[in-house]
Image (cartoon, rainbow, N blue to C red):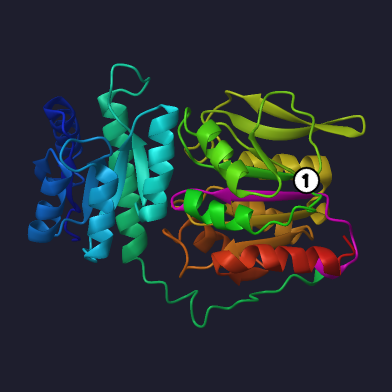
Amino acid sequence: MNKKPTVVIIDDSLLVRNILSDALTKKEEVSVIATGKTGMDCIDLAEKLKPDFIVLDIEMPIMDGLTALAEIKKKKLPSHVIMLSVLTQHGADATFKALELGAVDFIPKPSSGNQFSPEDIAAVLSLKIKGFSDSKLVSPEPISRPERTERQLNKSFQKPIQVDAIGIGTSTGGPKALQTVFAGIPAEFAKPIFVVQHMPAGFTKAFADRLNSLSKIHVKEAEQGDLVQAGTAYIAPGDYQMKVVSKGKDRFIELTHSEQVNGHRPSIEVLFDSLVETYGADHLLSMIMTGMGKDGSHAISNIHAKGGITLAQNEATSVVYGMNRVAVELGGIDFVLPVEELVPKMIELLKSRGN
């Protein structure tokens, strides 16, 4: 039997420490072995206890979370860091900075001002820790022998059919991976791009703004009724399912609070299925990237089966090789590539199709 993942909680609020510690202990899937209230405590406990995970607040006295995180990475301490994030623009900016510094994920911080109960937050945190731990325990042998850059190559996509849209799905590790992708897209790129990044409501607007600041094309959080424009990327808002629908010759964004799919809202599956319906699978180029679970893996395999182009981020550059692993195992991927090679391959494939 695998041992429970060990967790240290660092937050300057005794109340937050107690809430998370009690809620996680009740879940019985992880073991909370210590708590602390400053960045100094964080480094000290990381060195002494080497926990599997550190749940780390950003705003703290003496030493803040970002400084502590940078120090943990500098010292090459083995703990995976999950940030506690407040639902503000400043909080979101700090969170994305933390992900750039090497945090693996984040969760909303328990507070009277947000809609998440302590039990909800503990459940999400427990799920993330367990999912991340499980993904690291699975032997990757069946897939990465060797990397199989062109596995079960889909010959049908080589027909000179116009690509009309790009679909991208990602989860854990996605914010940093998507920054790499969007930084590489050229200014003259003329296809619409639709993205599902699993992320709570309140963070996707700040995330879209951040991608927009790094990108040469326009990136925005999708809004209900948006007319789809060429050379624009639409990020699905947290807690909404996003579809693309046709009205006459135009395409529009449709957002609903419909049920979760594969445990997610937004769901990659929902977006990709709508793209097939609206554009036709053989007019799509789709990517599935880092993230735990299987959301989007069947939908992208369906796109592959119907003649669309499909790419997956490889294991070596994924924070969690989960959704992309499942898609590769299903035989639904044409090219398995490091994150920095996804955009060059996309451009090359579009050119080969006369786009």
In which quarter of the view is residue 270 placed?
Answer: top right
Q: Quadrant of the C terminus?
A: bottom right
Residue at the farthest top position: 112
- As drawn, 144 above or below 290: below
Which residue position is annotated with label 1? 231
Q: x and y percent of residue 318 in the render?
A: 46, 62
In which quarter of the view is residue 112 placed?
Answer: top left
Q: Quadrant of the N terminus?
A: bottom left
Q: x and y percent of residue 83 in the render?
A: 31, 42
Tell me: 342 left or right of 77: right
Residue 332 visible in the shown view: no
Residue depicted at x 49% and y 82%: 145
Q: Decide whether residue 161 is among the magenta residues.
A: yes
Between 273 and 49, the residue placed more toward the observer is 49
Q: Decide whether residue 113 is among the magenta residues.
A: no
* Label 1 CA crowd tier, 10 Å (few <14, some 14–19, many 20+): some
- As drawn, 265 above or below 232: above
Residue depicted at x 35% and y 24%: 116
Residue depicted at x 19% and y 32%: 23
- As drawn, 204 above or below 154: above
Tell me: 133 left or right of 179: left
Q: Which residues are magenta?
A: 157-173
Residue depicted at x 67% and y 62%: 343
